[in-house]
Amino acid sequence: MFARSSTIATQLTFVLLQLADIITTMIALATGGVEQNPIVSRFMALGSLQGLILSKVIMLATAAVAIRYRKFRAIRCANLIFGAIVLWNITVIIRMVMASRHG
């Protein structure tokens, strides 16, 4: 029972972090930030939101494959990475907002 609820929580966390990444990236871009991931940056040639959504579709498909083959550790690792990315995005937003207020 615990293993199943832990697996569901890991998957839900993954999806929520993907959404948080889209939201914080869009806010960071709107405040003057730039996309640092060269692959996602290329996708953004389609448009900022469209490129982000494309990158997330690819991430969700990759996660689906990992889940299919019961590679839950890979999803947990991705959660740590995307948690750090979201935190980084938040720091970029704060810096950009502070810079715009002081200059």
Image: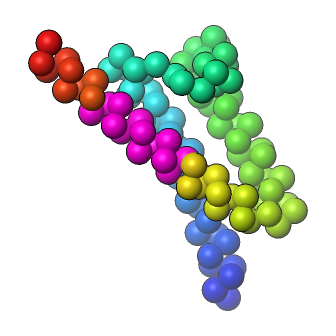
Which image quadrant: the C terminus?
A: top left
Can residue 41 be seen here? The reply is yes
Please name the residue shown 70% across and 42% down the image: 59
Q: Position of residue 2 (x, y in %)?
A: 64, 86
Q: Is 102 situated left or right of 25 in this image?
A: left
Q: Which residues are magenta?
A: 82-94
Q: Position of residue 68 (x, y in %)?
A: 85, 61
* Front residue of 16 and 77: 77
Q: Position of residue 85 (x, y in %)?
A: 50, 42
Please name the residue shown 55% across and 59% down the image: 13
Image quadrant where residue 26 sits = top left
Please name the residue shown 62% across and 78% down the image: 5
- Asked if residue 91 lies in the magenta stretch, the reply is yes
Can residue 20 be seen here? The reply is no
Q: Position of residue 72 (x, y in %)?
A: 73, 65
Please name the residue shown 50% across and 51% down the image: 83
